[in-house]
Structure formats: C-alpha cells, structure tokens
C-alpha cells in the first residue's frame, strides 16, 4: 500500500498528475481542487494516496490533503459511487462543504454535479450522514468554532454565529450550503439573515 508520494510534478492534465519519486513516475488520478494547489510542472509536492485494485487494473488516486483523501475513501464505500464520481464530487466541493451538504440532506445540490443523479445523491446522504457527523471536525465542533481564517471553513463559522443568535441548524444549513464558499463568514451570515427574513414573511 502506498501511503503518500513526494516528488517532482512531471505532468498534469484534467483530473490527472504524474509525480516522479526516486526516478519512477507515478500516475495519479486526482481532483481539480488538488491540481489547483499542488503547483506547476517541475515543482515538488506531496500527495496522500489511495490505491484501488480491480480485476485487471490498478489505479492510484492522489490528494493534496488528508481531509480530501479521507472524504474520497468514504465516498467510494457508497454503493454505485466509484473513483470517477468521487473525484467529480471533490472537484466541485471541498471536504467541509461536502460534509455540510450531506448533514443538511441537500440532495439537490449534489445532483448539480456531473454524473450524480437523484438516487446516487440520496444514497450518499443516507450512507454518510452519520459517518461524517462522527469524523468531520467542522460538524463535530459546531457551534463552538471561533477565529477560523480558512475560506473553506467560513460556512462553519457562519453557522456557529447563527446558532448563537438562536437559529436552528436545520433551518440555517440549507441556506448556507448553496452560497459561494469564497464569501466571508460575515457575508454568509448577512445573506442567511436576509433569506430567513424573506421566508418568514
């Protein structure tokens, strides 16, 4: 089992990267998220890996963070979700945003991802909701979250702020997960308050 790779980037393509380690080039399938952060051809990087062995094929998947790797490994345990679908989901969603979508039961947001239909989205939520609640740090720490600077965690900070204001998680989460992850926690809170105000009328 290959746990990780560290070496020079030889080649990149959509959802694909080759890393040279000790004179050997390892081809890894990966996400657009990982490709956006590992650097350019010629630079060194580290990928955390998952090896999938099929009847006639051995595939290596690589990810820039352990969080993305663990999320991928959970996804491929879901019936009907293979490596291709797992990469598609994590190319569109960060691990934290994916966890929030699943926790909120928002199958419609998952269905917007190429290759994910209604049944697959519902199966993902059914199979992973409890698992993510136990393993994802953002879900575990709500609402006791403060001083979070990472953009991917702005949703969690906004959620914590809204819970402090007295709103319930089940009414807030479906609103937050549909917003741009690049918004600040303050912007997300303002939007959620406006949206809930409209719904109350």
Image (spheres, rainbow, N blue to C red):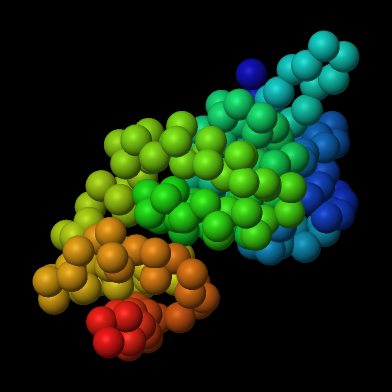
In this rendering, the answer to whether 89 lies above or below 122 is: below
Residue drawn at the location 25% of the way across and 61% of the way down: 169
In this rendering, the answer to whether 72 lies above or below 201 is: above
Q: Residue furthest top?
A: 55
Q: In the picture, which quadrant includes the N terminus?
A: top right
Rendering coords of residue 103 (x, y %): 37, 49
Q: In this view, does 97 lie to the left or right of 197?
A: right
Most foreground residue, 47 or 29:
29
Q: Is residue 164 left or right of residue 178?
A: left
Residue drawn at the location 38% of the way across and 54% of the way down: 104
Rendering coords of residue 93 (x, y %): 57, 58
Most foreground residue, 178 or 51:
178
Most foreground residue, 58 or 124:
124
Q: In the picture, which quadrant includes the C terminus?
A: bottom left
In this rendering, the answer to whether 50 lies above or below 153 is: above
Rendering coords of residue 54 (x, y %): 78, 16
Q: Is residue 200 left or right of residue 21?
A: left
Residue drawn at the location 61% of the way across and 31% of the way down: 76
Q: Is residue 190 left or right of residue 26?
A: left
Most foreground residue, 147 or 98:
98
Q: In which quarter of the image is residue 41?
A: bottom right
Give the total number of marks visible in the rendering: 0
Residue drawn at the location 78% of the way across and 50% of the way down: 15
Rendering coords of residue 91 (x, y %): 66, 55
């Amino acid at each position: 089992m290959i746990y990780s790779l560290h070496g020079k980037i030889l080649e990149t393509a959509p959802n694909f990267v080759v890393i040279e380690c000790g004179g050997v080039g390892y081809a890894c399938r990966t996400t657009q998220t990982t490709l956006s952060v590992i650097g350019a051809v010629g630079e060194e990087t580290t990928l955390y890996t998952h090896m999938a062995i099929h009847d006639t094929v051995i595939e290596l998947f690589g990810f820039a963070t352990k969080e993305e790797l663990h999320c991928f490994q959970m996804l491929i345990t879901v019936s009907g979700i293979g490596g291709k679908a797992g990469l598609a989901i994590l190319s569109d969603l960060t691990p934290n945003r994916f966890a929030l979508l699943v926790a909120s039961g928002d199958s419609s947001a998952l269905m917007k991802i190429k290759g994910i239909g209604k049944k697959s989205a519902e199966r993902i939520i059914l199979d992973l909701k409890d698992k993510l609640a136990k393993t994802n740090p953002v879900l575990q720490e709500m609402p006791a979250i403060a001083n979070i600077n990472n953009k991917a965690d702005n949703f969690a900070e906004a959620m914590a702020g809204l819970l402090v204001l007295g709103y319930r998680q089940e009414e807030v989460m479906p609103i937050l997960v549909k917003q741009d992850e690049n918004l600040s926690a303050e912007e997300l809170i303002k939007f959620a308050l406006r949206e809930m105000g409209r719904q109350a009328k």
